[in-house]
Amino acid sequence: DADVTQTPRNRITKTGKRIMLECSQTKGHDRMYWYRQDPGLGLRLIYYSFDVKDINKGEISDGYSVSRQAQAKFSLSLESAIPNQTALYFCATSDVMPGQGKGAGELFFGEGSRLTVL
Amino acid sequence: AQKVTQAQTEISVVEKEDVTLDCVYETRDTTYYLFWYKQPPSGELVFLIRRNSFDEQNEISGRYSWNFQKSTSSFNFTITASQVVDSAVYFCALQEYGNKLVFGAGTILRVKS
């Protein structure tokens, strides 16, 4: 089983619908992230959480919300989906900041959730 | 603010050719970390390497090598004797100490047989 699991992997929805993307991890990491990937734009950070009580906005948080239900779970919600939110969404985890521990600080990604908003 | 530029949108090579993917970064910090990730056609993101700002030694891992030059703010990635399986999108990323990871736009590498 994957260390970082995203559900659903693919979803087609209509404008105005509420959508939740779920992420769970078995790596035991405190830090979790949601990124969005669009062609030609790379990956952009939506929200991140350094522990269960810590939630922070990334560079493109408008139109999104998150919930950190437990150390292992981090959900991304689109309250009212719109077509320009059509993208590939990635959840990621990391152990520590680079240099703060033995880990390299690299992100471990889920397999992605492809969302299409019609 | 931190920024990563991958000027090459797409590169096509023939198998066995060497190819270099460019990455230029901007940061005001003296402590930072640079990463390369690979995204094959299957879509997952695979960590390739991490470099910290105090270590300018070049690194080689099999057919992969990385050239980190602080003087030009570059962290270029070279694949020697490319193979079809190297076809992927490659992302360079920068993380300032205490900050978040910022990705470049990515370079699509197509290796033809």
Image (cartoon, coloured by chain):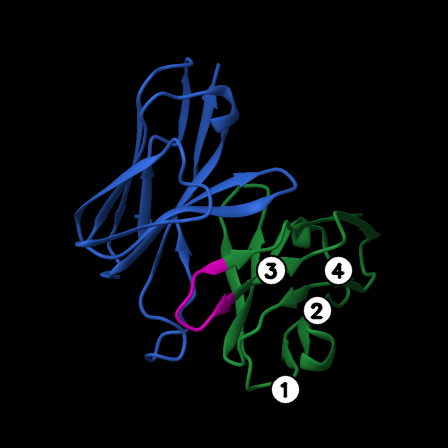
Residue that mark 2 sits on: B76
Asked if both marks, 1 and 4, belong to the same chain, the answer given is yes
Q: Quadrant of residue B26?
A: bottom right
Which residue type carries mark 1? Gln
Which residue type carries mark 2? Asn
**Total numbered labels placed on residues in the image:** 4
Left/right of residue B102 with respect to residue A41 in the rendered view: left
Which residue is drawn at the image coordinates 17% and 54% (left, top)?
A53
User: Can see residue B111?
Assistant: no
Q: Residues within 10 Å of mark 2 (few under 14, many from 20)?
A: some
Circle 4 marks a residue in which chain? Answer: B
Element at badge 3?
Answer: strand
Tag 2 near tag 1, CB within 8 Å: no
Q: Is residue A58 magenta?
A: no
In the image, residue A70 lies at what x, y percent?
15, 49
Q: Which mark is residue B3?
A: 3
Circle 3 marks a residue in which chain? Answer: B
Q: Which color is chain A depicted in?
A: blue
Which one is in front in this view, the residue at disc 2 or the one at disc 4? 2
Of the image marks 2 and 1, the number of the one nearer the N terminus: 1
Q: Quadrant of residue B64?
A: bottom right
Element at badge 1?
Answer: loop
Asked if both marks, 3 and 4, belong to the same chain, the answer given is yes
In the image, residue B51 lies at what x, y percent?
54, 76
User: Can see residue B76?
Assistant: yes
